[in-house]
Amino acid sequence: MWDVAVTAFHMMTPIKEPPLPTALFGTAIALFMGFRTNAAYARWWEARTLWGALINASRSLARITRSLTKGEPEDSEMRYNIILRQIAFAHSMRCQLRRQSPYEEIARVAGTEVADMAVARLNPANALLEDISGIYADAFVEGRITEIQQATVERVLIDIANAQGGMERIKNTPLPNGFRFFPNLFTRVFCVLLPIALVESLGLATPIGSTLIGLVFLAVLSIGEDLTDPFANSVHDVPLTAICRTIEIDLLQTAGLPAPEPLTPDQGVLW
C-alpha cells in the first residue's frame, strides 16, 4: 500500500522526490543482517552439535553399563535404573529448554518416585545425572565395580554435564538486544525509503520492484529471528522430541527392552 501511494503521488503531482542513497544504505543493512544471521545460525548449529554429543554420550553410558553388569541377571536392577534415568534425563532436558514441566515424561520413563525426586530440585535434569552417579558410587562401595570402571563412567557423565551446560548457556543467554532491535528498525526504514528512491526510474512498476526487494530483506530478517532461539518449540528449532526418541530407542534396545517407533515428520516438520 505504501509503494502504491508513493507511485500515485509521483504520477499525480509535480513534486519530485529527492534522490536518496538507498544503494549505500541497503548495502550497509545487508552486511549488518548477514552478520546477525550468521550469529543466529551459529547458535542453532551449536545447539544441534550439543544434542549430537548428548546422543553419543548416552549411547556410551548405556554400552558401558551393559558391559559392567554383564555378569548380573538379564533383568539387572542397576542396569535398568541407570538406562531409564538417562532416558528420563534427555526428556527432562528437552522439557526444561522448552520451558515445560518434565514431570510427566520422567514419570513415564523412570516412575513417579524418580520424578518426585527430580522435580523437587530446581534443575531436574541435573538431579537425574547425580542420581546416576550415585548408583555407580554405591556399586563401587559394594565392590561390584572397580575404581577404574567408576572413573570411566564419570568421564562419560562429565561429557553429558558439559553438553547440558552448553544447552543451558544458549537458552539463558539471548542475543544482545541491539542485534534484534536495530536490524528490525533499519530494515523497516529501508523499506519505507525504497519506493521513494525507485519511483523515478521504475514508474508504474515501482510497487512490484520495491515489494520484491523489500521482501528479500524482510525474509533475511525473519530467518535470523527464527534461528535466535533454537529451543523455542517452533518449526524452525532443533527437533528435540525426535532426538529424545532416538536416545530412548537406542538405550531401551541396549537394555533389551521394547522400544517405540521413531518419530515421523508432522506435515513436513520433525519436532
Image: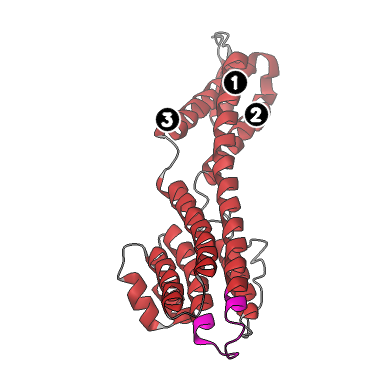
Identify the residue at horizontal 50%, vertical 76% (top origin). 82
Q: Nearer the viewer, residue 136 or 202?
A: 136
* Marker disc for residue 178: 3
Q: Nearer the viewer, residue 79 or 245?
A: 79
Q: What's the amino acid at mark 2?
A: Ile
Q: Which residue matches tag 1?
A: 26
Tell me whether circle 2 and circle 1 mark residues in contact (CB < 8 Å).
Answer: yes
The answer to whether residue 1 is above or below residue 98 is: above
Q: Nearer the viewer, residue 262 or 32?
A: 262
Q: Position of residue 221 (x, y in %)?
A: 56, 36
Q: Quadrant of residue 259?
A: bottom right
- Mark 3 residue crowding within 10 angstroms, few (<14) / some (14–19) / many (20+): few
Badge 2 or badge 1: first in the primary sequence: 1
Q: Position of residue 250 (x, y in %)?
A: 64, 73
Q: Position of residue 134 (x, y in %)?
A: 40, 72
Identify the residue at horizontal 69%, vertical 19% (top origin). 202
Query: Residues in magenta?
Result: 65-80
The answer to whether residue 179 is above or below residue 91 is: above
